[in-house]
Image: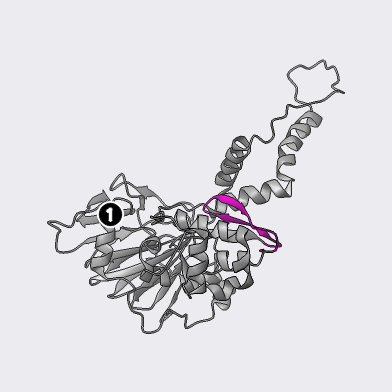
Amino acid sequence: MYQFTFSFSEFLSTYWQKQPTVIKGGFADFVDPISPDELAGLAMEEEVDSRYIARQGEDWQVEQGPLSFDNLPDDHWSFMVQAANHWHSGAARLVKPFQVMPGWLFDDLMISYSTPGGGVGPHFDQYDVFIIQGSGQRRWRVGPRKDNYQECFRHPNLRQITGFDPIIDEVLEPGDILYIPAGFPHDGYALETAMSYSMGFRSPKQQELLSSFADFIIENELGDEHYHNPDLPARDKVGELPASECQDLIAMMRSLMEKPETMHQWLGEYLSLSRHNMDVIAADPAWSGDEIVGALMQGEILFKIGGLRAFYHQGHPQIVYIDGERYQLPAGCEQAADWLCNQDSFSIAEVGELINNSALILLLTQWVNMGYWHQAD
């Protein structure tokens, strides 16, 4: 079990989205949750998002997965696996301490393996990241946030910058944590063969929210109303846009966002949809409701698959959103939202008397058959 050695609440008040920092020994006695061979095995899979980056002098090489590990140079290369927590249960355990953060902000856990000199060059990201040092050592430099960094194009698949004057220059050892807010440039390279774990938290942009909301409106055939003004006045300036009519049109658009049920449904569906592939395997053969009840009564634990996003709105636990879909819980089953959305697993201890609710068991059976929850491996 991974546990912080520091107060996360104090970290949030002092550093979160304010300034980068290094937390030495943020995890005591840190042990890698995954071996290099296991990570390489994931990188060779078609469904897993991975890439390889190597450098020789000023020449950079980038390959997208699935990867092959034949004829590799001795050093100056790395490979990384995105959303490793979706595919490896040990890696997923490293996410657990960070669940004091909002689940809707969490993106994924990326794991990198680097030989001496391996790295991706100076760059900055538009998300907040905690970089946990695993085995080996890695030197990290972080610069101040500014608007005038110059991009350089050493490879079409790398967005690097020319450089920066560091405000942090540290060598990370196992268990150290480097926090980098969005927009702060950084550059890290391995001093020896090393593993690093990047916990990414991604805030949505206004563009993304508006685009998603527009798609939701169209898909659900909402807002299919024309502008209506029975008191339209005559005018002598045909090219002038009256302020009152502009406000009417803006009010038409705003009215769609002033319907709480509409906004709740859109946000629930949008925020619960994973940005990365998951290891979803439909049950074969399919479970029956009686089998689900029997398994739970016999002490079985049902585990949520890695990366599955499940949320409910505060004060509205009767509706749960799972992987972009809205589900209505049966009347009297609102407490199920807690163990469905806030826990990584549940058993008869959580289900309790709701085991007798046939409508809830029907939903649980549906989700298990879809591959969203499963028995222990």
Crowding at dot 1, Cα within 10 Å, few <14 / some 14-19 / many 20+, comes out as some
Q: Residue at x 14, y 63 (%)?
A: 74
Q: Quadrant of residue 116?
A: bottom left
> Is residue 183 at least partly visible in the picture?
no
Name the one closer to the observer, 340 or 16: 340
The number of discs equals: 1
Residue 321 image position (x, y, % from top left): 58, 55
In which quadrant of the rendered image does the N terminus lie? bottom left
Magenta stretch: includes residue 254? no
**Horizontal side, residue 199 vs residue 340: left or right:** left
Q: Residue at x 59, y 37 (%)?
A: 219
**Vertical arrangement, residue 90 with respect to residue 67, above or below:** below
Name the one closer to the observer, 222 or 338: 338
Name the one closer to the observer, 59 or 311: 311
In which quadrant of the rendered image does the C terminus lie? bottom left
Residue 112 image position (x, y, % from top left): 31, 64
Q: Residue at x 40, y 70 (%)?
A: 376
> Is residue 135 at least partly visible in the picture?
yes
Q: Quadrant of residue 208?
A: top right
Q: Dot 1: what SS?
A: loop
Q: Amino acid at mark 1?
A: Glu
Q: Residue at x 85, y 23 (%)?
A: 230
Highlighted range, magenta: 314-333
Name the outermost residue toward the left.
71
Q: How does the figure colour the protein chain or chains?
A: one colour
Name the one closer to the observer, 332 or 239: 332
Residue 204 image position (x, y, % from top left): 55, 52
Q: Which residue is mark 1?
A: 45
Residue 287 image position (x, y, % from top left): 45, 58
